[in-house]
Amino acid sequence: MPDDPPASTAKNIIAAIHQLSKRSAELRESAKKNGIEANRLASHIALLQRELERIIEP
């Protein structure tokens, strides 16, 4: 039986957020090397990740 579409969509959203979080960490490391501040971006992504996970997985 295939995944319930809303549950499948939620899983896809969470997976995408985790990829964004991983990429954010990579960008933060790159930014350190280039002298650019990326912590603000990382903070916003982390906040978005927590909020969406809270909504999707109560």
Image: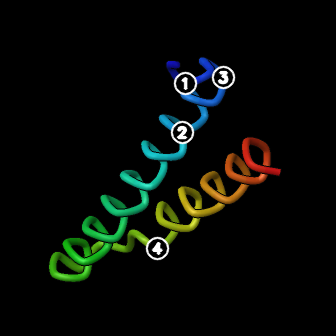
The x, y position of residue 23, in whole percent, is 30, 58
- Closer to the camera: disc 2 or disc 4? 2
Q: Is residue 20 above or below residue 47?
A: above
Residue at 83% x, 51% y: name it.
58
Label 2 belongs to which residue? 11
Label 3 belongs to which residue? 6
Left or right: where 24 falls relative to 26: right
Q: Nearer the viewer, residue 37 or 22?
A: 22
Label 4 belongs to which residue? 39
- Closer to the camera: disc 3 or disc 4? 3
Q: Is residue 55 above or below residue 29?
A: above
Whether the residues at callouts 1 and 2 have beta carbons within 8 Å, the answer is yes
Classify 10 Å Cα crowding around label 4: few (below 14), some (14-19), many (20 and above).
some
The x, y position of residue 8, in whole percent, is 55, 28
Whether the residues at callouts 3 and 1 have beta carbons within 8 Å, the answer is no
Q: Is residue 3 above or below residue 55?
A: above
The x, y position of residue 46, in whole percent, is 57, 63
Whether the residues at callouts 2 and 4 have beta carbons within 8 Å, the answer is no
SS for dot 2? helix
Whether the residues at callouts 3 and 2 have beta carbons within 8 Å, the answer is no
Label 1 belongs to which residue? 3
Outermost residue, front side: 1
Q: CA distance from mark 1 to mark 2?
A: 10 Å
Q: Earlier in the sequence, mark 1 or mark 2?
A: 1
- Callout 4, which amino acid? Asn
Q: CA distance from mark 2 to mark 4?
A: 26 Å
Q: Earlier in the sequence, mark 3 or mark 4?
A: 3
Q: Earlier in the sequence, mark 2 or mark 4?
A: 2
Snapshot quadrant of residue 37:
bottom left
